[in-house]
Amino acid sequence: MQEATGSGFLRAAGYRRVSMREQVDGFSLDAQENSITKYAREQGWKLINIYQDAGISAKKGSHRPAFENLLADAKLKKFDVVIVDKVDRFYRHLGGLLTTLDLLNGYGVSFVSVQERIDFTSPWGKLMLSVLGTLAEIYLDNLRQEVRKGKLQRARQGLWLGGTPFGYCNGLCSKCTDPNGQGYCPEFGQPDKRNGKALVLHPVESKVVAQAFDWYTSENYSFRTIADNLNQFEVQLSNNQSVPARQKGLPGRSAPHSFNRDTVRDLLGRMAYAGKLTYQGVDKDGKHRKRKNPSEIFEATHDAIISLETFEKAKEIRETRYKNCFSRNNRPVRVYMLTGILRCGYCGGSMRGVSNGYRRYYVDGNQRDKSCHCPQKTIYAEEFEKQFMDWINSIFENINLEVDIQNESVAKIQEERLNRSRDLFLLGEIDYASFTAEKKRTDDIKEALHTIEARSIIKFVQESKSHLLDWEHLSQLKRKRLLQSLVATAYVRESAFVAVQPTFAFQPTVASQSQGLRACNSGEGGIRTRDWFNPALT
């Protein structure tokens, strides 16, 4: 390897770099160039090129075009030595730094750092290089920790993290640079609303967001149809003018544009519109997690556009609609209300909804995937759904809510008697035996009437029964959501509804109507429904 020092003629290449943060803070690329040029002149070397990466970090795995070009030219032996102002301009990761220097060494290219004034080709230079590289890596790790803590603290204060989301602006109306500002926002050029550190409602976009959630929670629109509607939607302003809805676009990259399915889906998934801030946290490698459930949720300082209940309802609809579309080839597609619930009674495979264009069916998913040889046959959807709904209706027809309400009233009266007995015992007006007798009487009534569950059961039954009475007017998705609230799993053999696993909320109601019927192996609380339809089998 050629020596990097001395008066011999060498071809030198310089490398200078600043990160985005350093650019903002005023670190100078020119100062690095002057340092590199002066050093090459002092050594009598010919400086043939200076490679530059501006606004790019030197951490491990970062993409630096000029740095990569430097390595490619080193391989072609276009120069003999690389000059940098400081080691951290070249690399901030020790492993990457040592690997790169070893690569340069293999190409016959030396490396010199001006500020450290060390010849890194000597044994002492290599030792010093390891120390400096370690310090650079520690600095980067410390910076990453500080940035992470800063983001978390900002979230705790309720301040937004990242770019301004659609529906909001920074409130600096007098010097607005928002893409949907000048010529679009009616408040452009007016006095500032805030100091620019917190989000404020955009007078046009916020109404677009509210309308999108309103359409979606009605359960009559898909992402695509909402996008189509928004592209025709106009916001009515207070001066009787109207403004067409449009996206912000990306400043410097794209102009404001129309809505599409993906932008609507992203919009409907933002909890920020409900006045909440989500902090995603970091994974085990210290990197910020994306598109995952937030690790923490904070109250935001900005105003909400929708209620939290509206957001949660939209979230529930998204989960219910997963893998269910509204149309295919411009033709409506049915939502099979038992998919996700119905399973094969032989192999346990999920039953999938299919259609031949004329009739609807449920088929065994394991058979469909050819993962097992199961005797289960394809069943007609209409016939089985009727059988299933007959069972559901039979449960609710036999419930006597008046008795349950009366029982709850009896239990409440007895609880009050027990409280009075406790007070009298503490005052010394009755003995301990009388108090324990009253307590035992209360426990017996509770055990008999299941009063702990009575109130929640009655409310759940009343709401579910109300929806069932309005069944014909419910949308397909509302029907599916109702059934999912009642039944966790239903089993079919041949074309018979043979067993069911009620949900936790529905299980006490089913249990009260299934006395004398045998349990099954479909889980705790599972019921053999074939015995329900055929009592003789019991």
Image: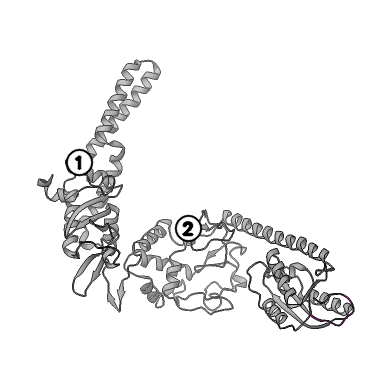
Q: Is residue 207 visible?
A: no
Q: Mark number for residue 96?
A: none
Read off the residue under disc 1: 402
Q: Foreground mark, 2 or 1?
A: 2
Q: Is residue 299 visible?
A: yes
Q: Where is residue 385 drawn, in percent x and y?
A: 19, 60
Q: Nearer the viewer, residue 27 or 312?
A: 27
- Please tell me whether residue 10 belongs to the stretch shown in magenta: yes
Q: Mark number for residue 293?
A: 2
Residue numbers of the magenta segment:
4-12
Q: Where the N terminus falls, by quadrant?
A: bottom right
Q: Residues within 10 Å of mark 2 (few under 14, many from 20)?
A: few
Position of residue 534 in the picture relative to residue 178 (left or right):
left
The Cα–Cα distance between marks 2 and 1, rounded to whole angstroms, is 43 Å
Residue at 28 percent across and 44 percent down: it is 457
User: With respect to residue 511, does 411 lie above or below?
Assistant: above
Mark 1 belongs to which amino acid?
Glu
Q: Where is residue 386 drawn, in percent x and y?
A: 17, 60
Mark 2 belongs to which amino acid?
Asn
Position of residue 321 in the picture relative to residue 355 (left or right):
right
- Please tell me whether residue 282 belongs to the stretch shown in magenta: no
Quarter of the rendering containing residue 429: top left
User: With respect to residue 534, does 98 lie above or below?
Assistant: below
Q: Nearer the viewer, residue 283 or 476?
A: 283
Q: Where is residue 268 drawn, in percent x and y?
A: 43, 65
Question: Disc 2 vs disc 1: Cβ atoms closer than 8 Å?
Answer: no
Q: Secondary structure at mark 2?
A: loop
Magenta span: chief secondary structure: loop
